Image (cartoon, rainbow, N blue to C red):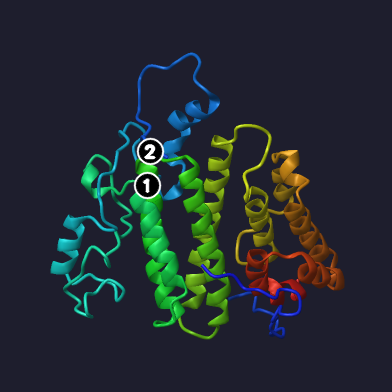
Amino acid sequence: MEERTGRGRGLGLRPPRKAPNPSSSIWKPVRSCPARDPKQTCAEAFREKSNPHLDDDDSHRSPNSPYLAGTCPDMCPAKERAQRERLRDLSVFERLKGNPARTSPHLAVKKFCRTISTVDIQESDVRPPPVLQRTLKYLMNLVNSEEHPFEVVHDFVFDRTRSIRQDLSMQNIIDDQAISMYEEMVKFHIVSHNRLVMCWGKSDLSSLCHLNIEQLMKCLLTLFKLYDLNRLSRSLHTNEAEFYSFFVLLHLGGKIQKMGDSLSLWYRQLSLPILQSKKMHFARALIRYSQMGNYKRFFCSLEAEASDLQLRLVEPFLDEVVFL
């Protein structure tokens, strides 16, 4: 996914609109085991107790369901491809030579299924980590496509990334590979957050923006759990501080339920390395300037310190910030 450059002079901030109407390596799956090693680590204990609900998209999963070891070699299982060809249920991105009833292993991507259960699914229906990584890379390349309107691209990638998260959860994949994939999916939702707002005026965009932020929050919260599970020392993961800052910056706008004082309580749960990081210091300062109405410092700080992704995340909120 390409990044914008020339941040300083090229903020490209839109003029304020009217105040919004307040009425509108070798992978091995972790499997359930009744016996516990007394030397079991905290991370392993957490996997057994909490991982069935590590991602909300897998919250329907029974705690007693076994984890799977996916064997599907393609982006979409052959059985699903055949069924969707019969039903002519193919996205425009999946159609072979534009035929709505034909696809191929190189085009079809497994759909998200809300009612799926590991009891009813076979290992051949689940993609292992290397296939999931390849699928995610394919999807992220589509995000920059200009052949179709962005809202069409977003709708396809939005659904297929949820399916990737579902396959990760069903296999209990909680290692560095999962962290890398979740970080990419968070980036996708941030870019979508920015670009969907730029398409202002088109139908159904309000609901698209709301659903996108909802999934962005879910991805972030799962990512924070993954960071903790894979922490070997007090040191931070490479991108951890910036991704924590995204969660803070989301509270600039009115698009999500305000945490209010609980955001301060949330800060207390974070480690000092995260709180003292430059990325988090910037995010907290931006929130503070907004609350104080100090917009000069707000915009100066934004232009001088924001990373590309932080700027993409904040930009759609700028009109709201001015009118708070």
- At horizontal 19% and vertical 79% (from top left) the residue drawn is 99
Q: CA distance from mark 2 to mark 1?
A: 8 Å
Residue contact at pointers 2 and 1, CB within 8 angstroms: yes
Residue under label 2: 27
Q: Position of residue 76 (x, y in %)?
A: 26, 58
What amino acid is found at the position of numbered circle 2 in the picture? Trp
- At horizontal 48% and vertical 71% (from top left) the residue drawn is 207
Q: Earlier in the sequence, mark 2 or mark 1?
A: 2
Q: Residues within 10 Å of mark 1 (few under 14, many from 20)?
A: many
Q: Is residue 121 visible?
A: no
Question: Which quadrant of the figure has residue 256?
Answer: bottom right
Q: Is residue 177 left or right of residue 164?
A: right
What amino acid is found at the position of numbered circle 1 in the picture? Pro
Q: Position of residue 121 (x, y in %)?
A: 23, 45
Q: Position of residue 68 (x, y in %)?
A: 30, 38
Q: Determine whether the residue tagged by mark 1 lies in a helix, strand or loop.
A: helix
- At horizontal 22% and vertical 70% (from top left) the residue drawn is 89
Q: Quadrant of the C terminus?
A: bottom right
Residue 194 disc label: none
Q: Determine whether the residue tagged by mark 2 lies in a helix, strand or loop.
A: loop
Residue under label 1: 129
Q: Position of residue 51 (x, y in %)?
A: 45, 37
> Which residue of the protein is positioned furthest toward the front in this rendering?
25
